Image (cartoon, grey):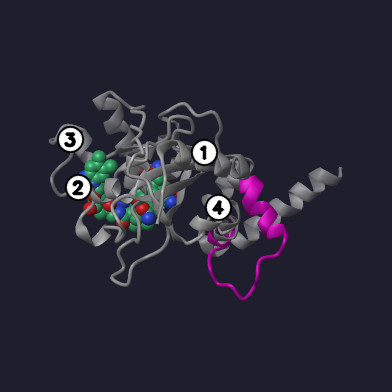
Amino acid sequence: MEGYSNTQVHSLIDNLSKHYLPYGFEFYPFLTSWYNSKVTSVFELPYNPDTLAILAVSTPCMFENTFLPFLKNKPDPSNTRDPLDQAIINKLQDINTILPDELKNIIILYDFELQPNRAPKILMQTAGHISGAAYYYQRSDVPADTWSEGDNIYGVSMHPKYGGWFAFRAVIIIEHAIAPDLLPREPVDCVKASDRRIELLNRFNKNWKDWTYRDMVDSIERYSEDQKLYFGTLPSERGEVIKKILVSRNERASS
Ligand code: B12
């Protein structure tokens, strides 16, 4: 086990960010105890409470700078995993090459992974909140009588720079890094007023397909039209969309 100071953790994050920012990824450190103190036991992470974990978030340009180049290099056709998930795995696996030797023992938990009991391995929105990446707005953050008791209202996270135009991708557990002195960072509360929070939760739950919940916080960058077309298409039909996007980008590049 290596003891890591607050400064050492932040210099590790700076190194990761320098490498990955152009590919559309950001990183936020936290301790497993911070996460475990919020979730019920089925979601708890079974590590020393002071274990360093790092949340990876994708920004809008991940689609153009990681996903499309990955597709051009022709992914393994025998791999049945979703191509976007393959591209993310392919890119984040390189983290091992950036970490110092004594920290190379890492476990990556992806947003799409399930435990044997079918519960998600990691709750990304909770990780986003406790690491300071994006405030997680839940039903409990607005007056209790806003919806009827039986209504299922899912929570939504908002990023201070990208609004809703981002995704949570993975949590990297650095099993050999213990960082008891890491200082927590509060997430930015970018939807303060109760009526705005209610509007945000309504849009996310009832109208998420119109994309508007993502604009309830100003964003410095949004998904491109190609990216919106891709995510707005059923997974079974995305292969055709990708062919069209790659062809039209090739034509634009050669004209
Ligand atoms: C299953 C799932 C769904 C399911 C169910 C949704 C749900 N929230 O349960 C369905 C299919 C409906 C769904 C739909 C969508 N989803 Co979805 N989904 C997930 C997934 C895989 C797991 C969520 C889950 O099961 N949560 C379990 C419940 C119990 O967790 P919870 O409600 O947060 O409860 C915990 C917290 O309250 C915590 N807690 C308790 N007290 C406190 C206090 C504080 C302060 C904190 C921080 C936490 C905390 O403890 C509880 C657990 O014990 C996540 C990815 C992931 N691995 O996290 C994406 C995810 C939530 N989905 C996402 C999105 C974008 C969508 C869609 C818009 C479709 C899409 N992909 O574009 C729609 C929108 C919702 C809708 N209107 O249908 C994003 C949300 C991003 C964001 N900005 O918040 C996520 C994070 C995926 C990602 N990779 O970014 N989804």
Side (left or right) of 202 relative to 171: left
Which numbered disc, 1 or 2, marks the residue that appears first in the sequence? 1
- Taking 191 as reference, is 134 above or below it? below
- Taking 7 as reference, is 16 above or below it? below
Say which element carries label 4.
loop
Say which element carries label 2.
loop
Q: Which residue is mark 4?
A: 100
Which numbered disc, 4 or 2, marks the residue that appears first in the sequence? 4
The span shown in magenta is 63-87
Q: Residue at x 60, y 39 (%)?
A: 18
Q: Amino acid at mark 1?
A: Ser
Mark-to-mark CA distance, 3 and 1: 44 Å
Q: Which residue is mark 3?
A: 146
Which numbered disc, 3 or 1, marks the residue that appears first in the sequence? 1
Q: Residue at x 33, y 68 (%)?
A: 115
- Taking 36 as reference, is 14 above or below it? above
Residue neighbourhood size for the residue with mark 4, other residues' Cα within 10 Å, grouped as few (<14), some (14–19), many (≥20)? few
Q: Amino acid at mark 3?
A: Thr
The residue mark sitting in front, 3 or 1, is 1
Q: Position of residue 83 (x, y in %)?
A: 58, 62
Is 184 in front, or is 251? 184
Which SS type dominates the magenta stretch? helix
The answer to whether residue 133 of the structure is visible from this angle is no
* Magenta run includes residue 81: yes
Say which element carries label 3.
loop
Q: Position of residue 130 (x, y in %)?
A: 32, 41
Q: Quadrant of residue 197?
A: top left
- Name, please, the residue furthest toward the right: 255
Q: Which residue is mark 1?
A: 11
Q: Which residue is mark 2?
A: 151
Mark-to-mark CA distance, 2 and 3: 10 Å
